[in-house]
Amino acid sequence: MKTSWILFLGLALFYVIMAVIYWQVGGEPVGITAIALSAGLSLIVGFYLWFTSKRLGNVLPEDNQLGEIADSAGEMGFFSPHSWWPLPVALSACTVGLGLIIGWWLVLIGVGSLIISIMGFVLEYERPSNAAH
């Protein structure tokens, strides 16, 4: 696990050096920005891998030579078996995108419906607690 975060932090350092060299050579601003953002993204991934390995004690199931595939299997999460909420979320997102082409009034309608549909999607299985029980 140690190798993975060192690899990404080394890649971030490489991108920073290349951005400085590209800037000094007289590169265009878009290229400098792209290389600098690549350094930032590599830094984010490297930090995540370092933080995760520190939290897990630097031992992962992948590092165990005698490990089985099932050793790294964990909780996958809860997935709704039948939910209609992804459809309004997608339609609202399309409305926002179409509103950028047609007019800002449609963006406002799309953002309003997107907020409502995201709230419905997230809170689909939440039930209010009743104090009368």
Image: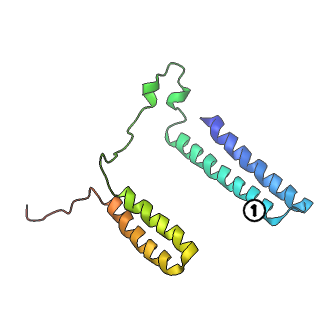
Residue 82 point in image, percent of width and height? 29, 49
Q: Nearer the viewer, residue 46 or 113?
A: 113
**Which kind of residue does numbered mark 1 sit on?**
Thr
Extreme residue toward the top, this view: 66
| Residue found at x 77% / y 51% | 15
**Rendered view: 12 above or below 59:** below
The residue positioned 75% from the left and 49% from the top of the image is 13
Report the side of 9 relative to 68 (left or right): right
Q: In which quadrant of the rendered image does the C terminus lie?
A: bottom left
Residue 111 rendering spot, x and y as whole percentages: 45, 72
Relative placement, left or right, of 124 versus 31 is: left
Where 126 falls versus 48 (above or below)? below
Residue holding disc 1: 33
> What x and y, as percent, mark residue 122?
35, 59
User: How many circles with numbers are drawn on the protein?
Assistant: 1
Quarter holding residue 3: top right
- Residue at image point 38% right, 56% down: 86
**Does residue 13 sit above or below 75 in this rendering?**
below
